[in-house]
Image (cartoon, rainbow, N blue to C red):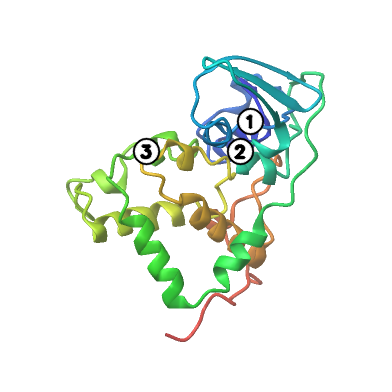
Amino acid sequence: IVAKGCDLRSIVTLIKEKQVPREKVVLIGVPCQGMIDLPKVEALINGEEVQDYQEHDGMLHITTKAGNEYSLQKTEILQDACIECRYPMPEGTDYLIEGTAKAPGDSGYDAIDAFASKTTQERWDYFKQEMAKCIRCNACRQACPTCWCKECFAEQIDLKWIGVSPDLSDAMIFHLTRIFHQAGRCVECDACYRACPMGVDLRTFTKKIGKDVEDLFGYFPDFNQETIPPISTFRENDSEDFITEP
């Protein structure tokens, strides 16, 4: 398996959860310089169709079918997940392709802190606003590398938790449950966010709960195959700060 940093961290999570036998896979690490965010590019070239492009010296030079030329700074058109990525250089692989990775990012938690600083009502209103966009196509679940349940709770028949319609309450329950299932497991690759055809801001919610896990339990899914995600274990000295009065 050829893997960038985020890919490898997902694979490590699957190895920990006994979904991938480590001895049966050969891991080839690829230093990552970040992936281009197509919507950002489209906005900067005014939606024109690309005829040709060249990349060198940190610049992306684009020629459109309309004959216009654009020179874009690559650092400005990377996916947000790549800009914020703390692990662009894979570790612990069987082989590592030679190359240079981008500088590690700063996690992007400033935006999450800004979201957390809002009032409870403001956060709830934003969550409802985003969930109202959901059409329950399950693209987020299908794209997520660590959504591997053989039978998703949303599709259980014997014990039916939610409906399959895009009803707001059903959409909220689906996403809340999926987000909590990702606590300490999400590698912030943004696959779910990119897959969503409706532009639901899933990354804010998954990053928020990921930050909570890191703050409360000191855990973040990295390349270490020995550490255990907090939702899979417990310690007597685990923080109980999350327990609050109603």
Query: Tag 2: residue type?
Result: Gln
Between 65 and 191, the one lying in front of the other is: 65
Answer above or below: position of 30 versus 193: above
Q: Residues within 10 Å of mark 2 (few under 14, many from 20)?
A: many
Q: Is residue 244 left or right of residue 1?
A: left
Which of the two discs, 2 and 3, labels the residue nearer the N terminus? 2
Measured in 3D between alpha carbons, the distance from the residue under mark 1 to the one under mark 3, in whole angstroms, is 19 Å
Residue 79: mark: 2
Answer above or below: position of 160 versus 189: below
Query: Tag 3: residue type?
Result: Pro
Quadrant in the picture for the C terminus: bottom left
Measured in 3D between alpha carbons, the distance from the residue under mark 2 to the one under mark 3, in whole angstroms, is 17 Å
Q: Residues within 10 Å of mark 1 (few under 14, many from 20)?
A: some
Q: Which residue is mark 3?
A: 197
- Tell how many labels: 3
Q: Are marks 1 and 2 in contact (CB under 8 Å)?
A: yes
Between 201 and 26, the one lying in front of the other is: 201
Query: Tag 1: residue type?
Result: Met
Q: Which residue is mark 1?
A: 35
Q: Are marks 1 and 3 in contact (CB under 8 Å)?
A: no
For the question of whether residue 226 can be seen, the reply is no
Residue 163: mark: none
